[in-house]
Image (cartoon, rainbow, N blue to C red):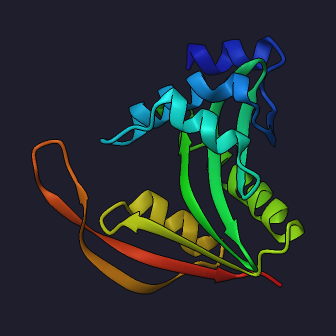
Amino acid sequence: MIGWLSDWWSGGGVPVVEPATPRDAARLAQLHGASFHRGWGEGEFDVMLRERNTLVHRLRLGRKVIGFAVSRLAADEAEILSIAVDERYRGRGFSRSLLLTHLGHLAGRGARKIFLEVEENNQPARRLYERLGFAAVGRRERYYQQAGGEQLNALLMRRDLS
């Protein structure tokens, strides 16, 4: 609560979605590592940020980067590779804003079909995707490996943009 009030008081209360730059690579890697078992390193983000067929947005609150979305484009299709929001800022609708803006930019670059994988039991993420028009079109058995070796299923989801 104190952190939220501090962000609001310092003028950081309005989230901004904007293109990420190579200077963001370290922070994006930090956010990814905190959100996923197999975090991507700074070098991986640096490469993605420089690729022409990859779109990376950051979610900024004040001067602090609190989230990101990464997609790769091919012809008229795109795959959302990863999306994350700092745990302290989840549940406030920031992911929705980030994803909607990101989808708009994908459409602007010619994407008409968007795909993503989500861990089958990740209900908050699934609710977000379903509310934004994604539907399950397939399932990948034992796709994600957890820290303890457990393997979890993924749902393949798709949304058409028009």
Relative to 117, say whether 41 is above or below: above
Q: Residue furthest right?
A: 108
Number of dots carrying numbers: 0
The answer to whether 59 appears left or right of 3 in the picture is right
32 sits left or right of 109 in the view:
left
In the image, 111 versus 130, the foreground residue is 111
Q: Position of residue 140 (x, y in %)?
A: 30, 77
- Along the line of sight, the residue nearer the viewer: 112 or 54: 54
- Viewer-proximal residue among 130 and 35: 35
**Residue 83 placed where, x, y %?**
56, 50
Q: Residue at x 33, y 42 (%)?
A: 38
Quadrant assignment, res 46: top right
Quarter of the picture containing the N terminus is top right
Vertical order, 124 against 49 (above or below): below
Residue at (20, 49) in percent of width and height = 146
Residue most toward the bottom? 137
Please tell me which residue is depicted at 71% across the width and 38% down the height of the picture: 58
The C terminus lies in quadrant: bottom right
Left or right: 4 in relation to 118: right
Query: Which of the 4 image quadrants contains residue 4?
Result: top right
Q: Percent position (x, y) of residue 81?
A: 54, 57
x and y percentages locating residue 95 in the rendered image? 63, 49
In-image side of 21 versus 157 (left or right): right
Residue at 71% over, 17% down: 7
Q: In the displayed structure, would residue 44 be above or below residue 24?
A: below
Q: Quadrant of residue 33?
A: top left
